[in-house]
Each structure stands twice: as C-alpha cells, then as structure tokens.
Amino acid sequence: MIVTYHPVKMPLRHTFTIAHGSTSVQESFIVALSHNGKSGFGEATANPYYGVTVPKMTEQVESVRSLIESGSWKIPEEFHQALLSTGKLKAFTLCALDLAFNDLYGKLQGKPLYKIWGLDGSKGPISNYTIGIDTVENMVAKMKEVPWPLYKIKLGTKEDIRIIEELRKNTGAVFRVDANCAWGVDETIANSRALKKLNVQFIEQPLKADDLDGMKRVFAESELPVIADESCQVESDVDKCFNHFHGINIKLTKCGGLTPARRMIARARELNMSVMMGCMTESSVGISAIAQVVPLLDYVDMDGALLLAEDPANGVQVTPSGLIFPNENGTGASLK
C-alpha cells in the first residue's frame, strides 16, 4: 500500500464566522492510500481551535509511513487499531487515514461502504444548511441565496434572539441553533423558551465544553433538546454526556474517523440518546464519508462542500431533498 497526500486551500463562498472565530479560506489535508490499482481518499481540515495544522498532519503521516506501506490489514478496524497503537497520531490525522482506508476497502470490495454495512442509502435525515454569524441583513441574504428546508444558525452574539426573529420573518424552514460554547446556564434556559416559539428544533453546545455541572441543570430545565458537540469529541465522551445532553454530534475529525464514529453511534443508541453527525467544512472527500452512515443518524450537518467556492473533489451530492450517491464504490470520493 502506498500513501500520498494533497494539502489544499479551499476558498469559501462567504467568510464563515462562529463564536470561535472567522475564516475565508479553509485549509485541508487529503490523504490517498493506493493498493492493487485502487485509491482510497480521506480528509481532515486544519482547525486553529484544536491546534490542527496541515504541516503537523503531514509530519504525523510521515512518522507512520513505513508502518502503512509495509503492513497488511484486511478490515478498517485492524488498520485503525494499528495506527492508534503507535501513539504518534492525533485524531484529525488518524481520521484522514481511517477514511482513506475505509474508502479503499470499499473500492477493493467493489461496493459502496453503506452497502457493505447493510444500510439503505435512500434512508436517513436531510442535511441542514449552515448560516454563519454576520449582520442580520447578511444572514438573511445568505439564507435567501440558498433556499433550504432546514437551517443551522450559528449564534453567540448579544442579539441572538433578535437574529432568529428576523430570520424567521423570511422563511418557514426549520431552524436549529449552535452557540459553540458561548452561552451561560441561565441564558441557555431563557433562550430555549424564546427559541421554542420560533420553531427551533434544538440547541447545540450552549455551554463551555467542560461545564457538565451547568449542563445538568440545562438538561433538566431547557424547553428544547440540547446536543453535545465540543463536549463529545471521542468515544469515552458519549457516556460523560449521558443525562447532560439529549444527544451527541459526532465529528469524524475529532473522534478519529468512521471506525470509532460507528462505535459512538452504537453506544449512544444503547443510552437512548439521539445522534447527529457534523462536518468541519470538508470537501466532498470528507462529506462522502459522512454520507455512508447517514441512515444511522437522527440529524446530519454535512453542508461543508456546499460552503466552498470550489470543491477539489467529487463525491456524494448534498441536496435539499437528500443525498445523491455517485456510481462509485467505497465512499464514492475522487479528486478532480
């Protein structure tokens, strides 16, 4: 097996702002694993909030190159465990390699991953389309630019309720909101009451990631369901979020790929928690990987490639009415 990688810079259609900061160009790290004439692709985006850069991911891949190119694994779980046991890879890099191996595995098997897993690709929730923090006028304009039945609205300002009130005047679409750790306990509970009246579906990550004591009260008193994001990064976090959140939002980059993500889904189901999967503004490489588990989810946020001015890859298409899978095996991803 041969490993190669492709650092890319992906300009966004609009500057994207959340409570953590803003970006107009998304850097990403696309990995390819090739064997027997087939290539599998994986991806992880750079992220300042988590201290992830393309040079760091490059260095980590080089540290395990000899292991990858000399090894032989039959299934993704074996490959993931072999990489994890080295202790040399952070989650984002591990994710890129895990996605690439899963894609390669499917291509070598001659089937899409979801079919290998016995899933029906026509089932599952539609993706939301995300509106980043901006002036109310610009947020309304962005919403009108992309008509969609379901929007995720990034919040974390002093005018959060007014923003939703103004957006609501312009669409009957369902809203879900994401505060990205910017609210306090009393603020969240009060906002839940106002947002429920504005047809908001749920609140994502209102408090700081480690404020589980505060979340216990929010969990008990919020009038809307609360979904963990920053509080649920890796497999062990699922149990920590139980009875503090109604559901979890899994990010492939943060947990280390599809292999651990599928275990997180299974554990959340055992705990009767709802399950969402989100993206980190990936190209169609990362988005196509998410698509493989959509039939297992309650909610999904996989609009990353739609936010790009130009997508460096082909793959699963995200539309207002559902997913369109390409006539490809594995995850369906390929580079342009």
Image (spheres, rainbow, N blue to C red):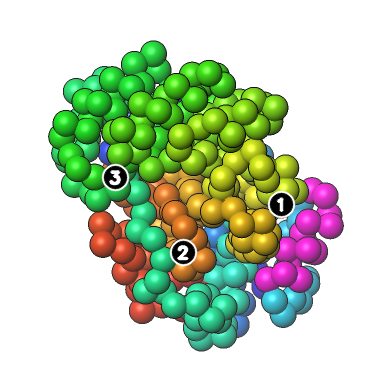
3 or 1: tag closer to the N-terminus: 3
Outermost residue toward the top? 158
- Give the structural element (helix, strand or loop) at label 2: helix
- Give the structural element (helix, strand or loop) at label 1: loop
Marks 2 and 1 sit apart, C-alpha to C-alpha, by 18 Å
Residue at 44% across, 54% down: 299
Instruction: Using the rendered image of the protein, determine whether residue 13 is visible from the camera's viewpoint.
Output: yes
Residue at 62% across, 61% down: 269
Against 272, residue 202 (above or below) is above
Q: Mark 3 points at which residue?
A: 174
Marks 3 and 1 sit apart, C-alpha to C-alpha, by 30 Å
- Tell me the amino acid under the disc marked 3: Val
Against 17, residue 241 (above or below) is below
Q: Do the residues labelled 3 and 2 touch (CB within 8 Å)?
A: no
Q: Which of 242 and 79 is in front in this view?
A: 242
Q: Which labelled disc corresponds to residue 166? A: none
| Quarter of the rendering occupied by the N terminus | bottom right
Residue at 60% across, 76% down: 105
Q: Which of 176 and 131 is in front in this view?
A: 176
Q: Which of 251 and 312 is in front in this view?
A: 251
- x, y percent for residue 135: 26, 20
Q: Name the residue under label 2.
A: 294
- Quadrant for residue 194, please give it: top left
Crowding at dot 2, Cα within 10 Å, few <14 / some 14-19 / many 20+, comes out as many
Q: Which labelled disc corresponds to residue 235? A: 1
- x, y percent for residue 223: 46, 34
- Quadrant for residue 166, please give it: top left
User: Over which residues does the magenta segment extend?
Assistant: 76-91
- x, y percent for residue 93: 65, 50
Q: Main secondary structure of the magenta part?
A: helix
